[in-house]
Amino acid sequence: MGSFNEEKLRFCIDRGGTFTDVYAEIPGRTDGHVLKLLSVDPSNYDDAPVEGIRRILEEFTGEKIPRTSKIPTDKIEWIRMGTTVATNALLERKGERIALCVTRGFRDLLQIGNQARPSIFDLTVSKPSNLYEEVIEVDERIELVHDKEENQGSSTPLIKGISGEIVRVVKPLNEEALKPLLKGLLEKGISCLAVVLMHSYTYPQHETAVERLAVSLGFRHVSLSSALTPMVRAVPRGLTASVDAYLTPVIKEYLSGFISKFDEGLGKLNVLFMQSDGGLAPESRFSGHKAVLSGPAGGVVGYSQTLFNLETSKPLIGFDMGGTSTDVSRYAGSYEQVLETQIAGSIIQAPQLDINTVAAGGGSKLKFQFGAFRVGPESVGAHPGPVCYRKGGELAVTDANLILGFVIPDYFPSIFGLKEDQPLDIKATREEFEKLAREINSYRKSQDPSAKDMTVEEIALGFVNVANETMCRPIRQLTEMKGHETRNHALACFGGAGPQHACSIARSLGMKEVLVHRFCGILSAYGMGLADVVEEAQEPYSAVYGPESVFEAFHRETILLKQVIQKLQEQGFREENITAETYLNLRYEGTDTAIMVKRRTTEDGSACDYAVEFVNLFQQEYGFKLQNRNILICDVRVRGIGVTNILKPQALELVSGTPKVEDNYKVYFGNGWQDTPLFKLENLGYGHVLPGPSIIMNGNSTVIVEPNCRAIITKYGNIKIEVESTINTMKVAEKVADVVQLSIFNHRFMGIAEQMGRTLQRTSISTNIKERLDFSCALFGPDGGLVANAPHVPVHLGAMSSTVRWQFNYWGDNLNEGDVLVANHPCAGGSHLPDITVVTPVFDKGRLVFFVASRGHHAEIGGITPGSMPPFSKSIWEEGAAIKAFKLVEKGIFQEEGIMKLLQFPSSGEVEHKIPGTRRIQDNLSDLRAQVAANQRGISLIKELIEQYSLDTVQAYMTYVQLNAEEAVREMLKSVATTVSSQSSELGDGNSVTIEEEDYMDDGSIIHLKLTIDSDKGEAIFDFNGTSPEVYGNWNAPEAVTAAAVIYCLRCLVDVDIPLNQGCLAPVKIHIPAGSFLSPSDKAAVVGGNVLTSQRITDVVLTAFQACACSQGCMNNLTFGDDSFGYYETIGGGSGAGPTWHGTSGVQCHMTNTRMTDPEIFEQRYPVLLHKFGLREKSGGTGLHRGGDGLVREIEFKRPVVVSILSERRVHAPRGLKGGKDGACGANFLVTKDNRRVYLGGKNTVEVQAGEILQILTPGGGGWGSPL
């Protein structure tokens, strides 16, 4: 492999969604041949890659090759190809018709997924559609056996699974019952099957038996989850199998069609395809689940293999900006891979390059809303495209670049207009911008009559700057969430639109260096020729890391290694061209964060200890080590690499002389129009230096070298741009915000809150925070007003502001730099005791300028039951440690002794009550330290912002973003008032609308709301007078919870991506009667208020606005455990239907969005057997639009435990709206050992015996509108 045949051509092809790029190496030529074609052009050719090869062969040989005849292969050495066929089929849902085969009881497993809804403010709860049409359930069941005691009394033999875990076949596969089900699928025309059976990762025999039977009956394709990704976790494994079954037939059909166009077919044609992991594979091994990142992977290979260590020693950020999206990646000497990613709503569990896609590109829509510039996430697409495409499109980023001179029509193909022969339409683009300018300037004058009009160019540049900031956010996240400084990287820029934005983005990120590859427009295609052939093998292995398990892992590695080497040798690779990498997938016991650790060797050739490497990697990524904690092995993986050494970068000769200026154009930069010389890269040579501003045309890509930058042509013909950092001299307007900077600061403030959240997730150790994501982080002004809240858990929204203000008032002048405050008491702005808030004041030159805060749900805080969620608590002291005010860190010193005393020996204030303290003090301390670290991250980022813009500017925009959110809410309230009063004159007089609404808790307590909206001012009063008094139970809700529910509802109703901050509540007054159960005394029990009452408040508010029917109205809190462990989960249900949508089934609703533990992990870690987890059919209310169905969860306990359930909507059903029917009430049952089915009510604690089964039926959502 790799020897060069002088007489034959080599082709590297990237078949993209819009264009197909071809790079060909032609004998006798030093430069490659580049060709770009439309991927779909049926009037001219059937297949773009074949057409590209045909045209280049014709040109090279001089012989005509008719389109109707087959392509001769005698002049082709090899073809390397990446394709978006799989990605497009997934995005457009145009794959094969498939069915899903699952273990009985789990038919809805993949639809439910992890229960989380994709966007927490989307009332429609839009989720991607299922890939499968039909589901068949198989009678079979495998059970994990944790210890010998579990097998007592059972005659079923124990079996050692592939992973080393002990399993028992509880129910053998019933093939006779399965056969008619499979035949039924074939009769419906479905001949492709995805199979996922419980615990098949360690016991795959049942899946292989299903495959044998299906193939014998005539199925064309069967994807087994155990064969594709033999890893624990049924949901991602099943989704991967679905993706594979859905896409592989489509890919195989395309590939066979492609290969059939050549005269020798596969006989003599050497063709390999790019996989998502950056490796090549032959046609026979190229399958759907490994193909979805085929094209982008080529780009990563392209920039990494040609720029790193050749053009720069810095780690690289890959920036691939296309028409509809931008791909961001990182390379620092080795490919950064992930084992799981989500694409088009489908989780794929397979090794793949870590490529993050952002919905921002040249086609991103430009809008002016609520006084701020907005870019995307919607795209104008290729059709109709931007305004300048002459198809009646809308303004997009490309139009802004055209106005500024960043896109040169003279150098853009004339392919527009009716006859497709017209250039870009700059006249129409300018007219649309002039319309927008009138709207923007009118708004600015309304805010400040002395405001100077913005020009079209200023507006276009403003939109480009906002687009750049949109793309900077994911780049910061990609680097900094892994512990790397963004500024220490170089930006490797490619794709059609990227080089126009590169200088500006690098400057925003603090980078000093941009690299634009000479083939930047076709780098994904070029990368195909730089990639190696890869074969992977992996198997599960579950063991505690130690000498014996390492020896066993090495034995397994050896077997897998032989397999991959043999496969590579079968493809013609000699042993000296094969390298191998071995990995162990390791995690700390008690966490779900596994790291794939590569075996490293020392200088003397001996192997390094995997555990040492794991600890180092864990500390680098998460910032801490876990002491005295076992390391667990999860999987053994081997990656065989057939080294091709095919394409080599060509070094150029140093040139002298002045670079040739082709033309001069006017380009608009921040300080106005500038005469800018244009150069063509093909006429530049190694050593040429071009000061900015200048334009370099690189094929179809325009490279903008901004003022204060300079471009250097490198030894390999690439462009290196040195970026000078400039001091920001922005001045604050006295009265109004700059409409461009407003959007940029929105992004920056939200970015700070998001990065705090990522730091907290990374550095915490508890399941609740790290995996279930039950936390929130936020940024506050010096008065405690919310500036930005990363959208994590809705019930925390806005509620933390009460805590920050209470602490500020309490401590007053006794706050110093280096202090960190902690609180969880409801009277101090808390929600319920498990949610501990850590607040850090931010000082600048001794002056308090900001606050940052993080709130996390601690799994244990003491109290009368393990898990600190007691169903029967009547007073706050029964729920655990309650902290009003304490300095967790005082002047930089962590007060460990003090916080331990508060958590372990809480005081009730009443001598007769002895309160149990926390049962997991070390976890509490670790998570509190993680919250301190998250706040510290926020402080660092705020200080960077102050350094960049000045304190006055940052604080001014802190106020402006709140005013911006306030305006959005006011406009929404005016619109609602107008709509409601037009529907019924009884509700208002035109100027004011009054709506009354109420609902009941299961004990009969009333939540009464009188909502008054002033349609002139856009103001609202939420008056909860008439609400029941404080209850002798735990569903009392602190006032902060009601504020959180109101702010959540307002944000959902605005339906625009405004920042979530204090401004949302500015037009709103909330009146809560003191002594009611929405404003209880400081002694009241409140643990259920946060998780139950918050949901009822939300239903009442949304019903008052007539926005949607009631959702399940509950979080279905389940805890169980004993002295050795504790477990907590919230269970989803049905969401309410709305005026244009059906409710969604089996999803977390409104005030929570935490994840559900995967069924296999659930059974692996806890003494349980999950009998059923599926949708509760017909539990959603009927109507014109149906409410979503609830869930059914049946858990058998394998040893005695204490179980607590805290739930609502077991008496009063979720109500329908506008004639829609109510959803079904929930119900909780215990099936005892003597087979009695006992109703537990909504709130109960019970000591469960081994073999007893808990059944939880969650409520459905209400329907909307009378059924037709």
Image (tube, helix red, strand yellow):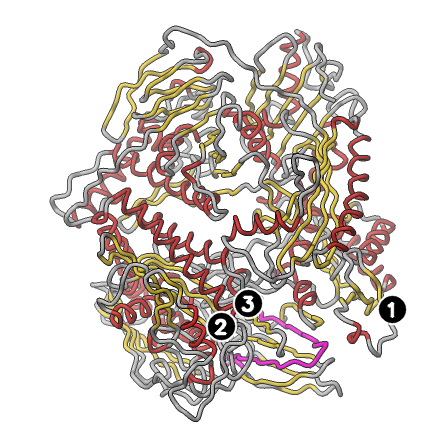
Query: Which residue is tagged 3?
Result: 1188
Q: Quadrant of residue 13?
A: top right
Where residue 1064 appears, x then y in whole percent?
30, 62
Which tag, 1 or 3, sits closer to the chain's start?
Answer: 1
C-alpha separation, residue under disc 2 versus residue under disc 3: 12 Å
How crowded is the residue under tag 2: few (<14 C-alpha within 10 Å), some, or many (20+)?
many
With 1110 as the anchor, is 338 left or right in this view? right
* Magenta part of the chain: 1187-1212
In the picture, which quadrant includes the N terminus?
A: top right
Residue 970, above or below 268 = below
Q: Quadrant of residue 782?
A: bottom left
Where residue 789 appears, x then y in whole percent?
37, 59
Is residue 1268 at least partly visible in the picture?
no
Is residue 436 at least partly visible in the picture?
yes
Question: Which element carries disc 2, helix, strand or loop?
Answer: loop
Question: Which element carries disc 3, helix, strand or loop?
Answer: loop
Kindly identify which numbered label has been placed on residue 1220.
2
User: Which residue type carries mark 1?
Assistant: Pro
Query: Which residue is tagged 1?
Result: 157
